[in-house]
Image: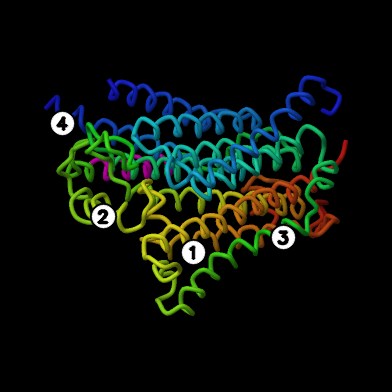
Amino acid sequence: MSLVVNLVLLVFLLVMALAVLKTRHLFAMAMLFGLYSLLVAGLFVVLDAPDVAFTEAAVGTGISTVLMLVTLASIKDGHELVSTQKSRTAPLIICIIMGGLLIYGTHDIAELGDPQSAPHMQVAARYIEKGQEETGVPNLVTAVLASYRGFDTLGEVTVVLTAGIGVLMLLGSRKKLRIKEVSNGK
Amino acid sequence: MANDLILRVVTKWLSPIIILFALYVQFHGDYSPGGGFQAGVIFSSAILLYSLTYGLDAALQLIPEYILRIGASLGVLIYGGVGVASMILGGNFLNYSVLASTPVAGQHLGIIIIELGVGITVASVMVLLFFTFARRVAPE
Amino acid sequence: MIEYIVGHINYWLIVAIMMVGLYTLMSRSNLIKKLAGLSMFQTAVILFYVSLGKVTGGTVPIISEEYSVYSNPLPQVLMLTAIVVGVATTALGFALVIRIKEAYNSVEENEISAMDEKE
């Protein structure tokens, strides 16, 4: 039963990705992008990952979509031009070859949900057995994130702070600077 | 958008509930899905909802920008401070077992404090991003 | 054969979504569409990793007395970090797009490179 839900959600996701590719009205694309993130959050819940679903729904549908809409409002350019100069066959061939190689690579991966597959054997089994008694926290994701892998979380918080500082440096000044003139004489 | 009655009333009722939910997710991250990142983003979405309905100036009166800049650095400082405190008390960097009398109590205390730091930083940076972007939109 | 297809079709569909995102990134010249394609590609990769951690008959990795089989918590932790880093990158990308628009008055990549080559 959960496999049917999985497949339906994945097919919807593929249709949504193709719609984002094809549409030329950029505000509609922003809305479809938010819907894509919401469907991915639903898939995470089916795959037994509610922490990740929480984060993806809040960050993808909330922050990313709002920032895209504010960018579109700021540049006041709501339509994408159809460009004739860029060739489209080279990216298509690259994507087909890469997709073929990736599908060939999934041949060795165990089937979805196999309890004996390699990622579940050594490190994760120890975290599941000893996690609650060593840290006192029943939620294993929080225990691993904050205690066993605390260094990575320190780096992640620093990345968030750095992104904030970067945006402040780029957009922090009040007046708009104009560097290149668009006239033909230049 | 401040003239729309339904939006104004619903925003005024929903924003405190969203902030309360963000605090619940932050401090119950040990027993149910949640934790610092989710709580920070939910808190920032409450401020975003208020700002979208009532305008940027009303939101800036609610939370002035210098508080956000201080908050963003304060979270990382709390996180690093826990690491340095555990070094001072005799253990390695970010070894929470030395923070309290028993190792398990120390781990629990360390996890709660660093999740608080993470939540403060993520909330401040997300709201700061939105305010910085929204200032560039020219008024019509 | 049927078992092989049923077990692996999730991965194939996720690879197809990844390739649609990559094609959007490479073939369209509008900068905002490129950023949306990049973000879709990142989200599809994260979906792939989390689907590697699922255990049939398992439940959410929160220890309680009623359950004994849990899904693998390790991919979920690593992907939590990846999602937040992805949104930080996307936010910086959008800030750069706003500045490019102010400097060149266009967000199409071929117009911008033509303006750069003219001088």
Disc marking residue A155: 1
Disc marking residue A21: none
Q: Nearer the viewer, residue A136 or B50?
A: A136
State how far apart marks 1 and 3 are (Cα). 19 Å
Disc marking residue B69: 3
State how far apart marks 4 and 3 are (Cα). 53 Å
Quarter of the rendering occupied by the C terminus of chain A: bottom right
Q: How many marks?
A: 4
Give me the chain letter of mark 2: A
Query: Considering only order in the chain, which callout, 2 or 1, is on the residue closer to the N terminus?
Result: 2
| Residue drawn where x is 58% and y is 64% of the image | B76
Binning the other alpha carbons within 10 Å of mark 1 as few (below 14), some (14 to 19) or many (20 upward) gives few
Give me the chain letter of mark 1: A
Q: Nearer the viewer, mark 1 or mark 2?
A: 2
User: Residue flagged by tag 3: what amino acid is it?
Assistant: Arg
Asked if the residue at tag 4 contacts the one at tag 2, i.e. Cβ–Cβ closer than 8 Å, the answer is no
